[in-house]
Amino acid sequence: MNIGKIEQGLKLFLKSIDILQQALDSSFIDAVIESGDNLNDGKILVENGQPSQSKQIELTAIYDEISQLNLKREQKRQLLQFALLKAEQVDKIQTNHQLTPDVSGILISSLLQNFLNKSQPSLILDLAVGTGNLLFTVANNLEKAGFKKLELSGIDNDDTLLAVASMSAHWQKTTVELFHQDAVEPLVTRKADVVISDLPVGYYPLDKRAANFVVHAAKGHSFTHFLLIEQAMLQLKPGGLGVFLIPKDVFKTTQSNQLLSMIQENGYFQGLLNLPSDLFTDEKAQKAILLLQKKGKQAHQAEPVLIGEFPSVKEHQEVADFIQQIKQWQKENLDY
């Protein structure tokens, strides 16, 4: 990966964002979307005379320079990721809307490499796709590993984040179906081979809708992340895999027994892997990868269940050895 090109492109892209923010008096993330759309469309969108003609000339020159860098798909994703990380700081974006770390997407793609079939089309669905960073990280890494028949789909109820995802996909020349809806509602998407998600954590406010789910709370609001896990299990094809980023201590909560019962009814609890602790500055924010498989086809309960904790990301050989152990476990336990 040519880091120099990414840095050069990022500097130019941030310059264009600054120009648009001042000209349009917009938030940082709205300027990200506007700039990305300009880059994709090959022309500057002008509304109410803004940006001015002189700024249009300046922006056109910037976009020409970015185009001349001939960035590859993954380089474009990384450039946008850095811009969005700055948006988080500038616009003070809420926690559930913040970017999923690249390491998480790389680890999930590693898990999927030994599950999916390169010769068969596979639909990957993200139930909380946001800006698309996790979905595109996983897809780009799988494509690099030789998976050429991937189909991508994403759902989110935030139209701003979906606008970022759409712009990002357009720039990367990635085909994806994006749906603007509450993922707890009945879904219009096709059944998926894999459902992934960095699950939003908190309470779901619509109790009547939550009551349709096994994991709903007997009193008060239900956990959004529990509802989405159940929704994912319903949306998977028989034998399909669910891979979720969840709070590390999720099974220590009061409603976890309901979640475990729902999983056992619909599928198999195949694994729980704590992510490296040094990825998180706050111990309370630590996450784990939850691995579930829907019943059907050749799926069966893994023996033993995959339980462990990734080594520090600084320990490259230990991480590589750990991933190799996971691959061996998958060969022996995960059929689809």
Image (spheres, rainbow, N blue to C red):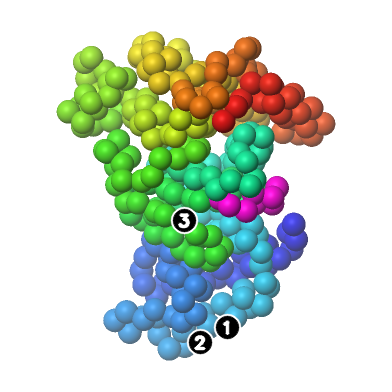
* Image marks 2 and 3: residues in contact by CB distance under 8 Å: no
x, y percentage for residue 252? Answer: 45, 12
x, y percentage for residue 20? Answer: 44, 72
Q: Residue at x 46, y 30 (%)?
A: 238
Q: Alpha carbon of mark 1 to alpha carbon of mark 2: how far?
A: 6 Å
Which three-letter amino acid code belongs to the residue tagged 3? Val
User: What numbered label is drawn on residue 176?
Assistant: 3
Foreground: disc 2 or disc 3? 3
* Image marks 1 and 2: residues in contact by CB distance under 8 Å: yes
Residue denoted by label 1: 61
Residue denoted by label 2: 57
Which three-letter amino acid code belongs to the residue tagged 2? Ile
SS at circle 3? strand
**Residue nearer the viewer, 49 or 227:** 227
Q: Residues within 10 Å of mark 2 (few under 14, many from 20)?
A: few
Residue 124 seen:
yes
The quadrant of the image that shows the C terminus is top right
